[in-house]
Amino acid sequence: MFRKLLIANRGEIAVRIIRACRDLGISPIAVYSTVDRNALHVQLADEAYFIGEAPAAQSYLVGEKIIAAAQQSGAEAIHPGYGFLSERAWFARAVEEAGLIFVGPSPDSIELMGSKTNAREAAIKAGAPVVPGTANKLANTAEALVTAIDVGYPVMLKASAGGGGKGMRIVRTAEEMQSAFENASAEAQASFGDPSVYIEKYIERPRHIEIQIVADKYGNTIHLGERECSIQRRHQKVIEECPSPLNDPVLRANMGAAAVKIAKAASYYSVGTLEFLVDANRNFYFLEMNTRLQVEHPVTELVTGIDLVREQIRIAAGHELVIRQEDVQWQGHAVECRVYAEDPEKNFLPSPGKITKLRTPSGPGVRDDSGVYEGWEVPLFYDPMISKLATYGATREEAINRMQRALREYYVGGIRTTIPFFQEVLNDAEFRSGEIDTGFIARYFERRPTPPKGDATSDLTDLEIVAALVAAYDFLQQQQSPPTIATQPPSKWKAVGRNIAFTNR
């Protein structure tokens, strides 16, 4: 097992990996940007290395700085977490070329499955069902129009290299194609540096269900069942469950077998997730693979009792899986809410600022994966998720009831959060019934009571939101000058007691 492991990430996922390292007897090493100097993950790590200014492009996305920090610390491996560099094949390859171990799949697997078009081809070769559409990138609008006729409207344009809802457009008629194609390509270029898109048949009111797989370097691959991820806002998940309310063991077995087959076809090892759409007749179709740890992994851990981060690190260290498919059992039900520093009454506008008061929920069946603390300044520069609240119960109803209790206990002062929004959704009759699909949030907002009068910002346009964010960013730039050694010297406690490296500043 590794002696030291560097975590190339921040926030709650960095804290989660630190805890797994502690359980395995590994010394966790953190990295941080200017605004993360006092972050929780920095405080919990044994050492921490400064890697640049606040914008991710100057810190968490600079592979050379992260590798240099790992080498300076003496770490043998780098864990990318999720987001940032976790699915960049060039980074995984650079880590290996530096003589370090990348805690994740091989660069070749990332390259193969990281491209949605390549992943579709791999799934087709493995004999797995896929959503009707193109296996290759579209050359232009004319090709998209021809393909859409073959597939049949409505169709979905999707970024070949993307995820998280970026570069996606629903096209219901030929007249919409040119504008949708141009917008999807532009967004894909801006988000992923690759403008290419492809077409899939748009399935009306599908469920978004994913299968968690775990595979070692010796050909052993298992699945840990499904997660229901249909509660999405702008194609981004906000509430997840394990298992799906469908609770169909036959469907789980069939989807699990397909996921394992695709992973083996890609020579995949580490943890990973295969995403599927399930239609009203319970037919399922492969969408894509996420070649990393998922945000929503806690619900699978709660139901199966398997520590996914621990297994990921063990696999990277060369250990063989000791869990066999027949050992996996699904007991009870888990629900997760992603708590964001956003204002639901202002079109989910980010709400950065200082957490003046923090009361986190606890008690039976409650788990809060967080990277913040009272007094912490939530920065504007990164994803606004501040914690993942998960609850467990013997039944779905019990898990939801515990989530309602946990949300009532949860208090975050000084900023707006999505906690009130989740309290509303969990009381919704359609959600409670389990008859959900990816269009749930849109339908919910149609029937949701009108916000209080005087809330002029509840219907902000995207342009207004961007303008507000730019103004907030400029304000922060003017108010926050980066601390230096001369103005803010490190304390002796940090330098000696916790052995944090400041020489890299």
Image (cartoon, helix red, strand yellow):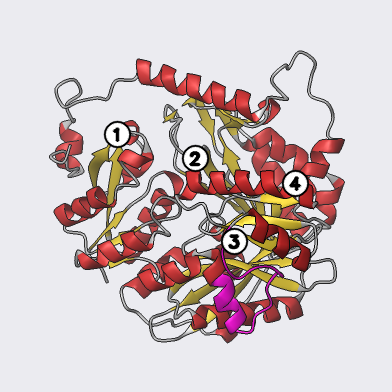
Q: Does the magenta run of residues contain 186?
A: no
x then y, percent, for residue 416: 59, 27
**What residue do we see at 22% from left, 44% from top?**
49
Provide the residue span drawn in magenta.
119-139
Q: CA distance from mark 4 to mark 2?
A: 31 Å
Q: Position of residue 458 (x, y in %)?
A: 72, 24
In the drawing, what numbered circle is on residue 98? Answer: none
Secondary structure beneath dot 2 equals: loop
Q: Mark 2 and 3 residues: CB-CB less than 8 Å, in contact?
A: no
Give the distance between the C-alpha atoms of the residues marked 1 and 3, in whole angstroms: 37 Å
Q: Are marks 4 and 1 in contact (CB under 8 Å)?
A: no
Residue 248 vertical position relative to residue 398 in the rendered view, above or below: below
The residues tagged by marks 3 and 4 sit, at their Cα atoms, a distance apart of: 16 Å
SS for callout 1? loop
Amino acid at pointer 2: Asp
Of circles 4 and 2, the one toward us is 4
Spatial separation of the CA atoms under disc 2 and disc 3: 30 Å
For disc 3, the marked residue is 138
Image point (35%, 41%), residue name: 57
As rendered, which of 210 and 495 lies closer to the eye? Answer: 210
Q: Amino acid at mark 3?
A: Leu
Residue 146 position, x and y percent, is 72, 63
Check disc 2 and report the residue beneath it. Answer: 383
Amino acid carrying label 1: it is Glu
Q: Earlier in the sequence, mark 2 or mark 3?
A: 3
- Mark 4 lies on residue: 176
N-terminal of the two: label 4 or label 2? 4
Along the viewing direction, whichever of 411 and 414 lies nearer the viewer: 414
Pointer 3 local density, CA inside 10 Å: few below 14, some 14–19, many at least 20 = some
Residue 427 seen in render: no
